[in-house]
Amino acid sequence: GGWTQHLAGPLGCSVVSVDPGAVTVPPALESRVRVVQGAVPEPAVMAAVREGAPYSVVVCDINRQPLHTCHLMLQLVEERGLVAPGALLIITLKYWREQKYSPEQFVDLFSARCEHIFMRWLLFNRKERTLVCVLKGELGALPGDGRASNKAE
């Protein structure tokens, strides 16, 4: 997907991509991308994901109800040794149908485990919001100006 290509391409990151569907990795990125077929929290998928742990960046861009997406990400964060303290978390919340939750509720879900929490409604896709936060622990440099905020926009 787009996140995999961006992280492995211009940013040069090693990526573990978990997807239940077919994933096509461009030949130029094959050395930096490992595809795990399936979905979290399937046991075989989790075993494969643990092989590369701990992770310093975790992106979740699944096409599920936003509350389910947040709980799935929190489940990954809670698994000991899977996500490094100070890791950057990026979560795409899909607003395809009527939503009964406010953006602030999603920010609140992460406030006990994360800091520097913010949510952006990207201009090119009015049906998705992107929640970004940093797992509490030793912090590295933050993208942007580094100002701390816990707000939804």
Image (cartoon, grey):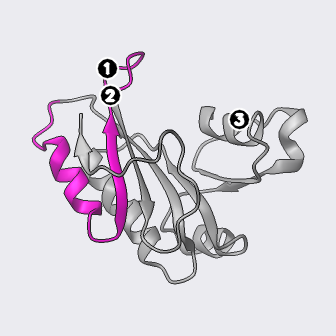
Q: Residues within 10 Å of mark 2 (few under 14, many from 20)?
A: some
Callout 2: SS? loop
Callout 3: SS? helix
The residue pinned by badge 2 equals 121
Q: Earlier in the sequence, mark 2 or mark 3?
A: 3
Task: Tell me the distance, in whole angstroms, between the alpha carbons under discs 2 and 1.
Answer: 7 Å
Q: Residues within 10 Å of mark 1 (few under 14, many from 20)?
A: few
Placement of 150 over or under 113, stated as above or below = above
Task: Tell me the distance, in whole angstroms, between the alpha carbons under discs 2 and 3.
Answer: 21 Å
Q: Residue type at mark 1?
A: Arg
Viewer-closest of 85 and 25: 85
What residue lies at 75% left-to-right and 49% top-to-bottom?
13
What residue lies at 57% left-to-right and 49% top-to-bottom?
20
Q: Earlier in the sequence, mark 2 or mark 1?
A: 2
Residue 64: x and y, percent? 35, 44
Task: Tell me the distance, in whole angstroms, between the alpha carbons under discs 1 and 3.
Answer: 22 Å
Residue 114 forms part of the magenta stretch? yes
Placement of 33 over or under 92, stated as above or below = below
Q: Please report contact status of discs 2 and 1: CB closer than 8 Å, yes or no.
A: yes
Drawn side of residue 117 relative to residue 36, left or right:
left
Residue 65 forms part of the magenta stretch? no
Residue 5: mark in rendering? 3
Viewer-closest of 132 and 53: 132
Residue 120: x and y, percent? 34, 33
Q: Select label 2 or label 3 by which is in front.
A: 2
Q: Residue type at mark 2?
A: Trp
The residue pinned by badge 1 equals 126
Residue 96: mark in rendering? none
Which residues fall within the magenta stretch? Answer: 98-127
Drawn side of residue 86 relative to residue 35, left or right:
left
Drawn side of residue 100 relative to residue 1, left or right:
left
